[in-house]
Amino acid sequence: MNDFISANAVALLILAFSVLWLIVSACWSWWVESPPLDQTISLSPPGTLETAVTVRIGDQYWLWLNFERGGLSLDALREKTGGMTTGPDGKTVENAGTPVTVRWQMTAKGGGEPVFAGEVRSTGAASAADATIGRLLGRAEVRSGRYSFTAEIVGDTPEFAGAQTRLTLVLDEAKGHSWALKLGWLLSLLGSFAIKPVAVVAAAVVAWNAARLFM
């Protein structure tokens, strides 16, 4: 066994380094991309939200109102939220859906002027996935730090009674500029196009030598 390890020391070191790289890359991506805010809020009856938010990375952020399917089909949820649908004539049309007005404010923990605030009458859908449809409420540059976030739904929307909705603050990865985001991209690119291929070759070498040893 010692001879096998010695003969494959380089390949084993490459494998160990590759695994460590991929673990660090995954942990870094999670740390960077985890939303500072992801909280439920009721639309009917109209709800309020007050919570502490910690922004780890100063960068551009989006605020989303996300509708979750729950027990509904995606089509049934889309009828309420609106978005692009297919009309009776087969043409794609945009449906505004049921409007929801959201008022929010985000201030530094010690007080002062809001760093991100607004009131938006949201309609339609800006994003859609298998289980979630989202409406974009706003975008702002937010510095790293601790904040107080408050929000309220203005007016009742009984169409969404019982619906699962969340307010989510997420990093704008497309237009982000922070060093942490760029480092995450670099780790991911190197992992996909350099580390993984080299690891596959090293694993093949170790497997081949192991097979020869026990044949």
Image (tube, rainbow, N blue to C red):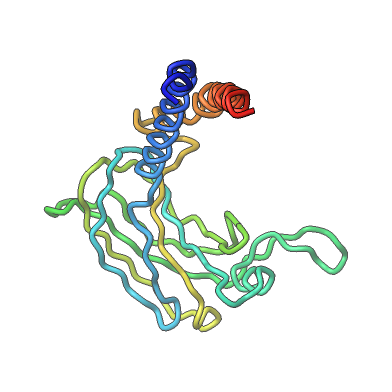
Viewer can see residue 197: no
Residue 33, percent from left and from top:
40, 44
Q: Which residue appears at 38% of the width and 49% of the height? A: 34
- In the displayed image of the protein, which residue is found farthest to the left? 110
Residue 62 vertical position relative to residue 168 in the rendered view, above or below: above
Residue 167, percent from left and from top:
41, 62
Residue 63 vertical position relative to residue 175 in the rendered view, above or below: below
Residue 192 vertical position relative to residue 101 in the rendered view, above or below: above
- For residue 138, side relative to residue 56 (left or right): right
Viewer can see residue 124: yes
- In the displayed image of the protein, which residue is found farthest to the right? 89
Q: Which residue appears at 44% of the width and 42% of the height? A: 172
Q: Nearer the viewer, residue 7 or 73?
A: 7
Q: State how many labels appear.
A: 0
- For residue 185, side relative to residue 193 (left or right): left
- For residue 10, side relative to residue 209 (left or right): left
Residue 141, percent from left and from top:
34, 41
Q: Nearer the viewer, residue 13 or 147?
A: 13
Q: Which residue appears at 62% of the width and 76% of the height? A: 72
Q: Give the quadrant of the N terminus.
A: top left
Q: Give the quadrant of the C terminus.
A: top right
Q: Quadrant of residue 63?
A: bottom left
